[in-house]
Image (cartoon, helix red, strand yellow):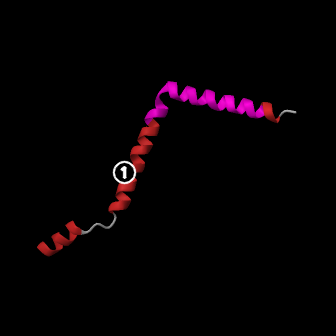
């Protein structure tokens, strides 16, 4: 029984996958928190609108 418990404690398979999953979760949470604030959302919207207008103006002969 103690041998089985030691093997279970020493087993490190799947640890990297768990760490990557936690990192992805934290990054996703950070992005969601940043995008949920109205100021950042409106600033990004105006930047993309400006880029779109510039591209349309450059494409018009």
Image coords of residue 41 (percent x, y): 54, 29
| 47 inside magenta stretch | yes
Return the residue found at the far left.
2
Residue 46's image quarter?
A: top right
Q: Residue at x 46, y 33 (%)?
A: 34
Residue 47's image quarter?
A: top right
| 59 inside magenta stretch | no
Mark 1, residues whose alpha carbon is within 10 Å: few (<14), some, or many (≥20)? few
Q: Residue at x 34, y 64 (%)?
A: 14
Would you say residue 1 is visible in this rendering? no
Kind of element beneath mark 1: helix
Q: Nearer the viewer, residue 38 or 20?
A: 20
How many discs appear? 1
Image coords of residue 10 (percent x, y): 22, 68
Would you say residue 22 is visible in this rendering? yes
Image quadrant containing the N terminus: bottom left
Q: Magenta-highlighted stretch: main secondary structure?
A: helix
Left or right: residue 43 versus residue 11 is: right
Left or right: residue 42 versus residue 25 is: right
Left or right: residue 43 versus residue 9 is: right
Image coords of residue 23 (percent x, y): 39, 50
Image quadrant containing the C terminus: top right
Image coords of residue 38 (percent x, y): 50, 25
Q: Residue at x 32, y 61 (%)?
A: 15
Name the residue tied to disc 1: 22
The residue range painted magenta reads: 33-56
Q: Residue at x 56, y 26 (%)?
A: 42
Return the residue found at the far right.
61
């Amino acid at each position: 029984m103690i041998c089985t418990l030691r093997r279970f404690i020493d087993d490190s398979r799947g640890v990297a996958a768990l760490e990557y999953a936690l990192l992805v979760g934290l990054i996703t949470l950070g992005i969601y928190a940043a995008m949920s604030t109205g100021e950042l959302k409106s600033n990004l919207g105006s930047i993309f609108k400006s880029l779109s207008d510039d591209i349309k103006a450059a494409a018009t002969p």
